[in-house]
Image (tube, rainbow, N blue to C red):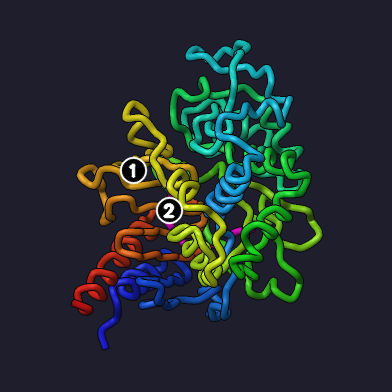
Amino acid sequence: MNASPLHQVAAAYVQRELYSSVEWALNVDGQTIDRGVVGYADTEAQIPVPANALYRIYSMTKPIIAVAAMQLIQQQRLHLFDPIQVYLPEFANPNIVLADGSTQPWQGMITVEHLMTHRAGFSYDFLPNCPVAALYREHKIAEDGSRSLADMVSAIAALPLAFVPGTEWRYSVATDVLARVLEVVTGQTIDQIIETQLLKPLGMDNTAFTVTDDDLPRLMPMYGVRSLGEMMAWPPAPQTLQRTDVSASHPPEAGTGFTRGGMGLLSTADDYLKFCHLLHTGETPSGERLLMPTTFDLLWANRLPESQLPMWIGPNMISGYGWNLMGRVMIDIGRSLILTGHGEGGWSGAASTHFWIDRERNMSGVMMSQYLGASMPLGSDMQQAGYMTCDQYLLGKT
């Protein structure tokens, strides 16, 4: 039997020693039509990928936090128009960076919608040519995993904004701030919020910010650069299978109290497919409705005006996509640079994880690897192979 397009792409990357392993799963019409894993957890020692392997999913944490926010919006406990200063007074009088690099006080509102659409004026440690990103690196915003979420957000509030909120899209720590807002609204910690509202109802038993000692052997080792701040080096360094230790910024052990909003979760391919099912339907696999249809439609709609497109992350253009309240959404296939479908959406993680959802084809795919700061387009290539596999499946049914 010929290998599927997904298997071919994954195997080619592993054979070229660009990734130690690649795991994937593809669902169409509610059925898993293709899944597999190639490579090793540790290439040098040839340690096999464990069953139900755990991955640091980095920014694939963001959609989970966004859906938790949508549930509170659905309950009228939170509103898109709420100024975050109501919940986090440390953001009441921010400074803003001017074109010449100086700062001045800014009076205005940063709203919950600004946070959910990355238009709140924040930045990220790894973004090049951004003076605020340089300040984030100096103050170890992303790198200090010993700091609580509340302390991290307070540190962000002490630094200037990169731009006037609402005026541009810039990938950022906004979802970390959003997670802290959710904590204030509910009186719970963010791990408690998502456990109660999402992980338990969805049966995502292998998704959490930390793992027990017994489960640590399932945690996949990391390759690539050590820190987020090193990710956007240009020109990119050759991609080699160099083991790295990210525990200072992303401690996995239980008892550390580590939580975030924009990163931090550990998960499995099967668990994340359960979350994808929710993003398809608003329901759990058992049929419990977590998002009402109107809330679901609000979640998926593009929020960015044409003037703020295309989106860029450093040197990388995300052409054809807009941004909804949880991730990318394809709004113009005529500008897309990869195989996709109208309304397809999802997101990726910094350590080479990726997911996509095409509601018209009733397809969702998840790809997991562990390489921080990869320069090779594994995620988009696996998505394109997923479309080929889905097309073959659907054509075979006709």
The C terminus, quarter of image: bottom left
Mark 1 residue type:
Tyr
Q: How many marks?
A: 2
- Element marked by disc 1: strand
Check if residue 240 falls in the magenta segment: yes
User: Label 2 to label 1, Cα distance in Å?
Assistant: 11 Å
Which residue is painted at 71% across and 66% down in the image?
A: 211
Does the magenta run of residues contain 232? no
Q: Which mark is residue 231?
A: none
Q: Can you tell which quarter of the image residue 15 is in?
A: bottom left
Q: Which residues are magenta?
A: 237-245
- Residue marked by disc 2: 346
Work out whether residue 110 or residue 313 is closer to the camera in this orientation and state it: 110
Q: Image point 23% across, 69% down: which residue?
A: 391
- Residue 168: give x, y in percent of width and height: 44, 27
Outermost residue to the right: 255
Q: Residues within 10 Å of mark 2 (few under 14, many from 20)?
A: many
Q: Position of residue 373 (x, y in %)?
A: 48, 51
Left or right side of 213 for 241: left
> Which is more N-terminal, label 1 or label 2?
1
SS assignment for the magenta stretch, majority? loop
Q: Please tell me which residue lies in front, 176 or 368.
A: 176
Q: Residue 29's quadrant in the figure?
A: bottom left
Image vertical order of residue 111 relative to residue 345, above or below: above
Q: Which residue is mark 1?
A: 321
Image quadrant where one finds the N terminus = bottom left
Q: Looking at the image, which residue is at 40% across and 58% down?
A: 356
Q: In terms of secondary structure, where does tag 2 sit?
A: strand
The location of residue 33, given as percent across then percent down, is 36, 78
